[in-house]
Image (cartoon, rainbow, N blue to C red):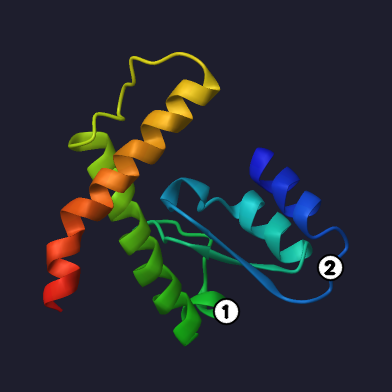
Amino acid sequence: RAALGMVHRHSPGSTRKLTLGADKGYDAAEFVADLRQAYVTPHVAQKSRYSAIDGRTTRHKGYKLSLKHRKRIEEAFGWAKTVGGMAQTVYRGVERVRSRFVLTMAASNLARLPRLLAA
C-alpha cells in the first residue's frame, strides 16, 4: 500500500510509462496489476516459482539492465549492514540515524576508492 501511495504521489494520473524497481517481496499479482493500471512498468525481481512478472516485462533489455543496477545498489546497503553496523543501530532519532548512515556510506565509498582508481 505504501509503495502504491508513493507511485501515485509522484506521478498522479501520468500517462507516460514509468518503471519501478523492487525486490522479490513485491512480486505479487495484485501489486503488479496495480502498477500496470497506474502506467508503471514493474521491474521487480522475479520469484523462482509463481511469479507475477511475465514476458511483457522480462523480454526487454531495460529489465535486465534494471536488475543489474539494483544489484549494484543493494551491495552498498549490504556493506552498510554487515561492515558498517547499520543492521541494528544503537542511535535513536531520525537525525542521529541519518548522520550515522551518511557517515557509513562515506566510509563505504572510501573503502571502494582504491578499486575505483585502479579501474
Which element type, helix, strand or loop, lies under badge 1? helix
49 up-or-down from 53: above or below:
above
Q: Secondary structure at mark 2?
A: loop
The structure residue drawn at horizontal position 23% and vertical position 35%, both measured from the top left corner, is 84
Residue at the extreme right of the image, as rendered: 13
- Could you tell me which residue is drawn at 46 percent across and 45 percent down? 25
Q: Quadrant of the C terminus?
A: bottom left
In-front residue for pair 81/46? 81
Residue kind at label 1, given as amino acid type: Arg
Q: Residue at x 34, y 21 (%)?
A: 89
Q: Earlier in the sequence, mark 1 or mark 2?
A: 2
Answer with the quarter of the image where residue 5 lies. Answer: top right
Pointer 1 and pointer 2: residues touching (CB < 8 Å)?
no
Position of residue 2 measured from the top left corner of the image (x, y, whole percent): 67, 38
Image quadrant assignment for residue 47: bottom left
Residue 91 percent coordinates (x, y): 39, 16
> Which residue, given by chain and number where applicable, does mark 2 sit on?
14
Q: Quarter of the image holding residue 37?
A: bottom right
**Residue 94 shows in the view:** yes
| Residue 1 makes an appearance in the image | no
Name the residue rendered at 20%, 36% in the picture. 82
User: Which quadrant of the figure contains the N terminus?
Assistant: top right
Q: Crowdedness of circle 2 by 10 Å Cα count: few (<14), some, many (20+)? A: few
- Identify the disc placed on residue 56: 1
**Mark 1–mark 2 distance (CA, rounded to whole Å):** 20 Å
Q: Amino acid at mark 2?
A: Ser
In the figure, 29 relative to 17: above or below? above
**Residue 7, horizontal then vertical, whole percent:** 72, 53
